[in-house]
Image (tube, rainbow, N blue to C red):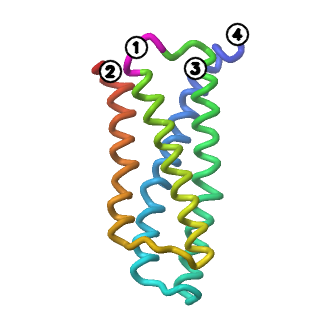
Amino acid sequence: MDFLFAIYPWIKALHIMAVIAWMAGLFYLPRLFVYHAERATAGSELDQTFQVMEEKLLRVIMNPAMIVSWAAGLVMIGLGMFDWGAAWAWFKAVGVIAMTWAHMWMAARRKEFAAGTNTRTGRQYRIFNEVPTVLMVVIVVSVIVRPF
């Protein structure tokens, strides 16, 4: 445990970097879905291009970033760096769980595009594109401002 306390600033830095990478993907993937739904027909060359972009974004950037975010966050919780007695901690926890759900929802939509079974419109993806932003605001305000 002493070793983990000694490297705590590095764990926190890793957590922040992973969250930034994860959020970049969470912001970008629904935008790709908007264009995919509006501009590509199933089986077309453009459809295939979007599928490659979406799959690589999810598997190469978003999934590893989410895993590292969770792992570093859980280590910090294990080190007692989280005040479960304060409401802000619970708001953050719920926000992170909701963000993970949003990630999984997007992963399921990517599989629908890959199977050629997407039924959602670009407008629906535009609306969903706001979900990660709202969750990010809840999480950051909870941790930094701690209004509760």
Give, as a three-letter code, the residue at label 3: Ile
Examine the structure image and report whether residue 82 is included in the region drawn in magenta.
Answer: no
Q: Nearer the viewer, residue 108 or 135?
A: 108
Which is nearer the N-term, disc 2 or disc 4? 4
- Graded by Cα atoms within 10 Å as few (under 14), some (14 to 19) or many (20 or more), the crowding at tag 2 reads some
Q: Are marks 1 and 3 in contact (CB under 8 Å)?
A: no
Which residue is at 57% across, 70% downward?
112
Which is nearer the N-term, disc 4 or disc 3? 4
Q: Which mark is residue 146?
A: 2
Which is nearer the N-term, disc 2 or disc 1? 1
Q: Which mark is residue 2?
A: 4
Q: Are marks 2 and 4 in contact (CB under 8 Å)?
A: no
Which residue is at 41% across, 66% downward?
31
Give, as a three-letter code, the residue at label 1: Ala
Whole-angstrom CA distance, mark 2 to mark 1, is 9 Å
Q: Are marks 3 and 2 in contact (CB under 8 Å)?
A: no
Helix, strand or loop at mark 4: helix
Helix, strand or loop at mark 3: helix
Whole-angstrom CA distance, mark 2 to mark 4, is 28 Å
- Picture coordinates of residue 12 (x, y %)? 55, 27
Whole-angstrom CA distance, mark 1 to mark 3, is 14 Å
Helix, strand or loop at mark 1: loop
Magenta stretch, residue numbers: 83-88
Which residue is at 51% across, 74% downward?
118
Whole-angstrom CA distance, mark 3 to mark 2, is 17 Å
Q: Nearer the viewer, mark 2 or mark 4?
A: 2
Give, as a three-letter code, the residue at label 4: Asp
Q: Which residue is mark 3?
A: 77
Q: Nearer the viewer, residue 124 or 34?
A: 124
